Amino acid sequence: MSENEEDINEHIQSIFLEQGKIQAIKAYLEKTGLGLKESKEAVEQIIDPLRDEYPDRFKSGGCAAIALFSAMGLGLFASTLF
């Protein structure tokens, strides 16, 4: 892993702990330019090592998380149209 990747991973872990998973995904997406699905998968891998130390941060988001991801995806799609 390159130094830049390590910096990004630390940044994403910090955002996850402070602001949550959705904000971490948004930050990763903005930093890398990857799509929503790829960013979500990458963030899940980046934050997985934190699972044992911060189990309360990994509770299921349920319907609210699905709605936010959907809205985020629609916003990104709409922004590419204009």
Image (cartoon, rainbow, N blue to C red):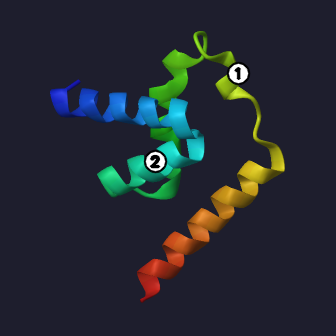
Specify the label residue 22 is tagged with. Answer: none
Secondary element type, mark 1 = helix
Q: Residues within 10 Å of mark 2 (few under 14, many from 20)?
A: many
Left or right: residue 64 versus residue 71 is right
The image quarter containing residue 80 is: bottom left
Q: Quadrant of the N terminus?
A: top left
The image quarter containing residue 58 is: top right
- Give the residue displayed 72% in from the left and 49% down from the top: 65
Left or right: residue 32 versus residue 12 is left
**The residue under label 2 is which amino acid type?**
Ser
- Give the residue displayed 26% in from the left and 26% down from the top: 6
Q: Is residue 63 above or below residue 52?
A: below
Mark nearer the viewer, 1 or 2: 1
Q: Quadrant of the C terminus?
A: bottom left
Q: How crowded is mark 1: few (under 14 residues within 10 Å), some or many (20 or more)?
A: few
Q: Provide residue 2's location: percent of width, then percent of height.
A: 18, 27
**The residue under label 1 is which amino acid type?**
Asp
Question: Between residues 52 and 20, which one lies in front from this camera angle?
Answer: 20
The residue where tag 1 is placed is 56
Q: Provide residue 41's location: percent of width, then percent of height.
A: 51, 40
Q: Provide residue 7's location: percent of width, then percent of height.
A: 25, 31
- Give the residue displayed 19% in from the left and 34% down from the top: 4
Left or right: residue 56 versus residue 12 is right
Residue at the outermost top position = 52
The residue where tag 2 is placed is 39
Secondary element type, mark 2 = helix
- Give the residue displayed 46% in from the left and 47% down from the top: 39
Residue at the outermost bottom position = 82
